[in-house]
Amino acid sequence: MAGIVVIFDFDSTIIECDSDNWVLDETGLTEKFYQLLPSMAWNPLMDKMMNELHSQGKTIQDIVEILNRTPMHPRTVPAIEAAYSLGCHLKIVSDANIFFIETILKHHGVWNCFSEVIANPSHVNEGRLNICPYHDYLKSSHGCNLCPPNMCKGLVIERIQNSLAAAGKKKIIYLGDGNGDFCPSLRLKDSDYLMPRKDFPLCDLVSKNSNKIKAEVHGWRDGKELEHVLLHVINKAIGEGSNINNSTQKVSVDCKMGPIPIDTLQPLPKALSVPQ
Ligand SMILES: Cc1ncc(C[n+]2csc(CCOP(=O)(O)O)c2C)c(N)n1
Ligand SMILES: [Mg+2]
């Protein structure tokens, strides 16, 4: 076992859009949604939109067909499969909902690669999709002012970190794009890796607060770079894990620096090489 946990954000990390916005756009509900957003929180409003679809006679199968067409970079699935094959534990921590995530990942045949998906709960009841907040903010606040009221990804990461320590796993690689990925990024340790998507809000936050980030930072721009950089980082993490007296100096790579030139990456051992 590699002892490495790879944590993926979902929207704009695994897929090329926000899943809620994709479904709203494809069902013609975007205008209505944004008319109501000033007076309602995101999760209950998304739940209301699912009710609206049901009233219009749209079935769960109609929603599944829309989700199956969600834009995704062609190298993202191979990257997930490669990380899984190398023995990494894969998890998703997302402010999207479980139904959308499960449907999309099953369609691409990678649902079983993930040992845990932490997202807003959702279930089908009498042909209608119900969506609930992950954190019940009406009962109590999670208390973090960096995160939306329904989910503090930092608290989720803290729980994962505690369970990893108990299971003897060593390193986290965290991939994300959004403002909600900044709080968990602050929790990563100096033995962990952070992979922010370039030209997305997380990358900006990381650049402006680099003194607060302990993890080694490796940016990526698209699915092709995600694949290449992720396999490079896994390779590095495996190498460090096998060297007990490892004293490698921490190198922080500014995610604004542009793509990592291919010739500066260590050659991948055969087992890690990217499938053509
Ligand atoms: C106050 C507030 N505004 C907006 C949202 C909704 N929201 C924010 S980021 C995002 C995509 C997250 O998916 P991922 O974490 O996979 O990138 C969603 C659905 C919210 N929950 N609260
Ligand atoms: Mg995201």
Image (tube, helix red, strand yellow):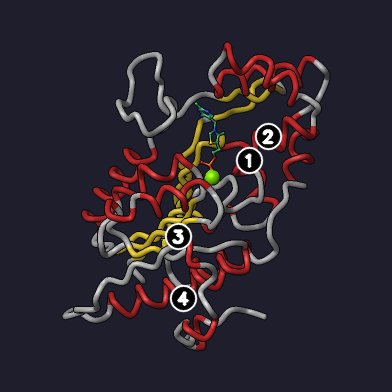
Instruction: Tell which circle, 4 or 3, labels the residue nearer the N-terminal end.
Output: 3
Instruction: Tell which circle, 1 or 3, labels the residue nearer the N-terminal end.
Output: 1
Residue density around tag 4, few if under 14, some if 14–19, many if 20 or more, within 10 Å:
many
Residue type at mark 2: give it. Asn
Q: Is residue 178 above or below residue 39?
A: below
Asked where in the image residue 34 lies, by quadrant, the reply is: top right
The quadrant of the rendering that contains the C terminus is bottom right
From mark 1 to mark 2, how far is it between C-alphas? 5 Å
> What element does badge 4 sit on?
helix
> What element does badge 2 sit on?
helix
Instruction: Tell which circle, 2 or 4, labels the residue nearer the N-terminal end.
Output: 2
Give the residue at mark 4. 232
From mark 4 to mark 3, how far is it between C-alphas? 12 Å
Q: Is mark 2 within 8 Å of ligand 1?
A: yes
Give the residue at mark 1. 18
Q: Can you give x and y, in whole percent of width and height, for residue 91 in the image?
A: 45, 52
Q: Can you give x and y, in whole percent of width and height, for residue 208 in the image?
A: 38, 50
Give the residue at mark 2. 21
Q: Is mark 1 within 8 Å of ligand 1?
A: yes
Residue type at mark 3: give it. Met
Identify the residue shown where x is 24% and y is 48%.
Answer: 162
CB contact under 8 Å: marks 2 and 4? no
From mark 4 to mark 1, how far is it between C-alphas? 27 Å
